[in-house]
Image (cartoon, grey):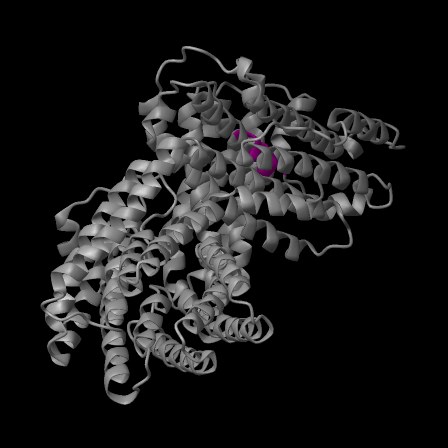
Amino acid sequence: MNTYSRRLRYFFSGQHFSDGVRTTVAILLPALLLAQWGHFDLGLTVSTGAVCVSVTDTPGPAAHRRNGMLAALAMVLVTSLLTSVAATSVWLLGLEVGVLSFGCTMLLVWGARAGAVGTAGLLNVVLMLAHPPTLAQALPHAGLLLLGGLWYAGLAMVTYQVRPYRPAQQALGECIHAVARFLELKAKFYNPATALDSDYRELVAQQVVVNEKQEAVRDILFRTRQIVNETTSTGRRLVLTFVETVDMYERVTAGYYDYAAVRDSFGRSGVLPYISTLIRHIATELDHLGVAIQANRPYDGVGPDLSDEWMRLQARISALDTDAEGNTRVLKKILVNLRDIIRRVGNIRRYFDESLAPANVPSRAAEHTRFVAHQEIEAQALSQNFTLKSGVFRHSVRMTLACLVAFAIAEGLWHGQHNYWILMTVTIMLKPGFSLTRQRNQERIIGTLAGGALGAAILWLVPWTEVRFGVLVVFMIMAYSFQRTVYLATVIFLTAYLLIMFSFLGLSYIGVAEERITDTLIGCAIAFSAGYFLFPSWESEQLTDYMAAALRANLAYLRQLANRLAGRPLPPHEYRLLRKNVYVSEANLAAAFQRMLTEPKSKQHHPTETHEFVVLNHILSSNIAALTGTLREAAPAVPPFAAEGRRALNSAATALQKSLSCIAPAATEPSPELPPTAPDVPADADDKSLLEQLTFLQKVSGDIGKITEVLVK
């Protein structure tokens, strides 16, 4: 199975495609059935309710999805009745748009799913503006919307009950796929033809993706009681495989070396291409495992034997003509790291052997739930955010003003048949951060133009009604499958299927396309202007918080290394929690940096130095992980910890603490002393290796301090 076919299998067996099919069925079926009985308009209203509720059905535990959909049902019912009353006057309607746009956006203080509930309410209001019901029709119309929402929620919950493990399998498969891609990028570092700076940019960007996928799996696995309590073989294997995947990812990130020096020393030996090839083959094998888990199919391993390939690489390295043992030490470290990764790939392969799953494992729900964030719905959180210091409050004010402008233009200056598209564009395009608003605007404009051309081409080239309907269904599935991953694709397919749908209603697709493009341009202009001029949120203003979080996480990571060197045990779950905090903080920092690069040049703060800060933190945590992994394998014995090494470790901790004090002086707490250790001991070869690694940690920490001084100026 080549790369292209694997990507297709990942897509068609993934949760996004499943959600796309379910959403399409939930929207299309009511309209088609009622159209057969001559009530297409009623069917369209039922489908509208399904559309609104589907907004809250984002990936996560089934209980959270259910609660989100129930809240959306209540929101749809309330906004439907309010809009029916407000539609008696354009002034009341404008007041409702202003109040609801503010109130629904403020729901973001309780998290993304609560924010999606607010989006569902706003979407319902906007869609109702096309044909507002009269007061006499208010209750029947609200009932039809409620019916559509219940239909979607019921269909979704039945799917979860019939296949309870599918979301977890799909999320785990996507996580393994992201780690495989990360490993594939690591192979580039052994290719002298690539630029290291570019390689690091790609690697850091993929680190963000891996963190997102790992958080998604944690959210599903550790919040779902049936899986956490491990009452079934499938649940146990899912948890164990995920833990093994994260441990393997640690080994992948721990495999950091001075790649420039490695290229200089061994570029002419011819061994680096073989290392790169083996890493790519490991990534391919891992990718095969991920797609098999995601598709819930048996694994049919057809790749090369990784162990044999590793042994051939070992023979090549041993055959190198070296004058000193130290010349090939780094290559031997690479070999050891790759051997461990291959072993863990084999452990992941055990997912498909049910007989190897341990039985009667005691519940570890309390331990697992420590790895997921908890969002409590507290009323006081809303009042606490009624200040301009709150990003959610500023965004809510921004959204309110933008929606009022869009409503005024649609009602007073632009009298298109579907002028509510202007308001809809604003509500979808305007995001809390300017970088995402700008990106969405670009994708919306390009996607609308491309989708309009695609839809017009289909209508012009395909005269057969049945074929057009088949294309419409395919475009709907694609649009809803990509809505959380590739927004540009969603806009293209959404625009095309809307043109085809309106052609079935007897409207001129040319006129609809022109109006769609015009409304999109107006709405995007309003959203872009609001994001730039109204309480703009620049990523450079938030970067210091992310930098401080990364430094705190690495400091804690460094202290656990010092504890281990001092002979103190560290419970596995405590260590994994520290490791998770490092991954999350570094991914958040990298994501913020990437968003900053999409903002205007004048708003970017030291982009070159910030990139260096991101890379140095990644190098630091990778080396701490490498040292910790070596010490964990050596347990219970601990190598001698000479005084010189302790001084290097103390110096590294002091440098990190100083950097943290520069970035966040008000929130910095005094750093606790590193644990004492045994008296100085004679140094042997292993001691020298350990000392070299600790000295390198000291150097990287010092470099971080130098970059920090530049960034805070």
Q: Reply above or below: 480 against 237.
A: below
Q: Quadrant of the C terminus?
A: bottom left
Q: Reply above or below: 3 against 541.
A: above
Q: Reply above or below: 130 against 549.
A: below
Residue at (25% x, 47% y) in the render? 150
Tell me which corner region of the image, top left, top right, bottom left or bottom right, holds residue 268: top right
Answer with left or right where residue 157 lies relative to residue 488.
Answer: left
Answer with left or right where residue 519 lies relative to residue 535.
Answer: right
Magenta-drawn segment: 247-255
Between residues 152 and 468, which one lies in front from this camera angle? 468
Residue at (51% x, 23% y) in the render? 565
Q: What is the chief secondary structure element of the magenta stretch?
A: helix
* Residue at the limit of the structure toward the bottom, as seen here: 413
Q: Position of residue 295 (x, y in %)?
A: 55, 36
Answer with left or right where residue 463 lies relative to residue 186.
Answer: left
Magenta span contains residue 34: no
Q: Position of residue 673 (x, y in %)?
A: 38, 32
* Residue at the limit of the structure toward the top, as seen here: 360
Q: Position of residue 168 (x, y in %)?
A: 44, 34
Q: Reply above or below: 645 against 134.
A: above
- Say whether residue 543 is visible: yes
Total number of numbered discs in the rendering: 0
Between residues 199 and 452, which one lies in front from this camera angle? 452
Q: Position of residue 639 (x, y in %)?
A: 58, 19
Residue at (41% x, 10% y) in the render? 360
- Say whether residue 702 is visible: no
Magenta span contains residue 251: yes
Tell me which corner region of the image, top left, top right, bottom left or bottom right, holds residue 393: bottom left
